[in-house]
Image (cartoon, rainbow, N blue to C red):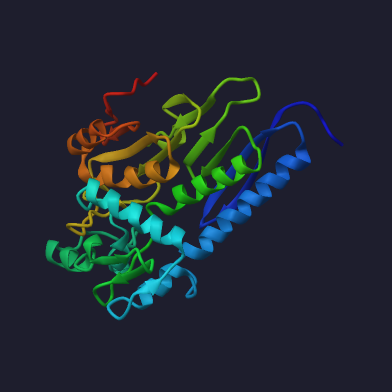
Amino acid sequence: MRTTQVEVYKQGHRLMGNYFEISVVDDDANRANHCIDKAVEEIRRIERLLTTFNDQSQTNRINAMAGIAPVVVDQEVFDLIVRAQRISDITQGAFDITYGSIDKSLWNFDTNMKSLPSKEVALESVRLINYKNVILDPSKHSVFLKEKGMRIGFGGIGKGFAAEKAKQLLKSLGVQSGIVNAAGDLTTWGNQPNGNPWTVGIANPQADEGPFSYLSISDVAVATSGNYEKYVMIDGKKYSHTIDPKTGLPVSGIQSVTIISPNAELSDAMATPIMVMGIRVGLDLINQMRQIACIIIDDQNKIYTSQNINIK
């Protein structure tokens, strides 16, 4: 039965190893759910391209041929790697898709982890991480990892990329307004049925306390990287599961970084490197970029923001 009342229709799905929630504004439930189904299909398609859990994925084909031969990939995968390389340049290597070569056995972040590895062991674990050793050939759209044992992974940018692609698809289907929320990395467009912008909570590092602030946004994407979901306590100090690719050691001192920009992929990709770079250097970088804002919460719950944002 067709209703004429404009409402928000939502579906939640387990995708890319995370919980995605897709919301669209429409006056027809069937049409809304059909559009959401199409967006879910699109995210699954991207997952098949990028996953490291399937030998046939383009990511794993690149990794399997590391040090041997270039691999021709789809244009969209090639372009995503080009954009990832640009973010590596901007962040001086704090963002690096070749982090896939890090020795996972060093970093299990479970209750058995009682000490950090030595600086030497940690450095050895990251010796293959170097985005400059990803050789791209635009004429063939091929990707070659120079060193045997190198691995790429899209954990730092893939969710944002997928959210953005789902949003583009929904807009192409005529959806005027909605949210794609990829496990807290979310992108919005249009307004709520009442005409107001969407309201988004900024995650509180004390996770059980609810959001510490709200933003009213439209046509904006927000992503948060934090140490409150996966971390280890050693000698009373909290270490995040975020590893500094230069040292091989986990970062400390920052609880969470929230990035607000026009694009979910950019927000997703910038949140982790700002944690690695630290408060002063990270904010300095964000302040030099256009249309991007940042909120950092340190270990003492002190809030730092880039110049172009006011926290309510």
The residue lying furthest to the right in this view is 1
The residue lying furthest to the front in this view is 139
Coordinates of residue 107 in the picture (x, y in percent): 30, 62
Coordinates of residue 13 in the picture (x, y in percent): 61, 51
Q: Residue at x 68, y 45 (%)?
A: 35
Q: Residue at x 27, y 42 (%)?
A: 274
The residue lying furthest to the left in this view is 120
Quarter occupied by the N terminus: top right
Q: Of 175 and 221, which appears nearest the observer?
A: 175
Q: Of 80 and 63, which appears nearest the observer?
A: 80
Asked if one can make out residue 172 in the rendered structure from this viewpoint, the answer is yes
Asked if one can make out residue 236 in the rendered structure from this viewpoint, the answer is no
Residue 193: name its quadrant: top right
Residue 29: name its quadrant: top right
Coordinates of residue 91 in the picture (x, y in percent): 23, 47
Coordinates of residue 308 in the picture (x, y in percent): 31, 23
Residue 52: name its quadrant: bottom left
Quarter occupied by the C terminus: top left
Tally of marks: 0
Q: Is residue 239 above or below residue 256?
A: below
Q: Is residue 232 above or below residue 147?
A: above
Q: Residue at x 43, y 60 (%)?
A: 77
Position of 47 compared to 288: left or right?
Answer: right
